[in-house]
Amino acid sequence: MTIKQYDAVLLKDGRSGCVVEAFDNKQFIVDVGSSPEDWETIDASIDDIEKVLEK
């Protein structure tokens, strides 16, 4: 699975988010949440990501 910056992803814990930074397709910085009021920026690895969501 190839994940790029700005891809929408589904995490294995059920949250969805947007990749804001991708490092060697292994480590990512992901914004999760439904709006700016509840966004959380997290670190995620390739193992934390279930799939890339359709655009």
Image (cartoon, rainbow, N blue to C red):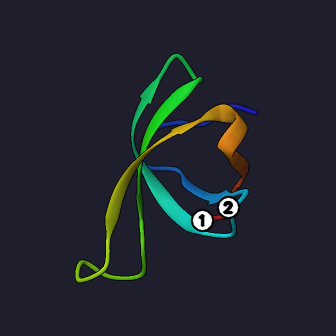
Secondary structure at numbered mark 1: loop
The residue that appears at 71% across and 36% down in the rendered structure is 47
Q: Amino acid at mark 2?
A: Leu
Give the amino acid at mark 1: Lys
Residue drawn at 47 percent across, 35 percent down: 28
Q: Residue furthest top?
A: 24
| 2 or 1: mark nearer the eye | 2
- Examine the image and state in which quarter residue 3 appears: top right
Asked if residue 48 lies left or right of residue 22, the reply is right
Q: How many marks?
A: 2
CB-based contact (under 8 Å), mark 2 and mark 1? yes
Q: Residue at x 40, y 50 (%)?
A: 42
Q: Nearer the viewer, residue 30 or 6?
A: 30
Quarter placement of the N terminus:
top right
The dot on residue 55 is: 1
Position of residue 23 measured from the top left corner of the image (x, y, whole percent): 45, 22
Figure check: 24 above or below 41: above
Q: Describe the element under mark 2 as helix, strand or loop.
A: loop
Up the image or down, 53 lies above or below 45; here it is below
User: Where's residue 40, x and y in %?
Assistant: 33, 64
- Image spot of residue 36 (x, y percent): 24, 77
How far from the left and from the top, in percent, is residue 45?
A: 59, 34
Mark 2 closeness class: few <14, some 14–19, many ≥20 residues within 10 Å: few
Q: Quadrant of the C terminus?
A: bottom right
Q: Is residue 11 above or below residue 37?
A: above
Spatial distance from mark 2 to mark 1, Cα to Cα? 6 Å
How many C-alpha atoms fall within 10 Å of the one at disc 1: few (<14), some, or many (≥20)?
few
* Label of residue 23 in the image: none
The residue indicated by pointer 2 is 53
Which residue is situated farthest in the left direction here? Answer: 37
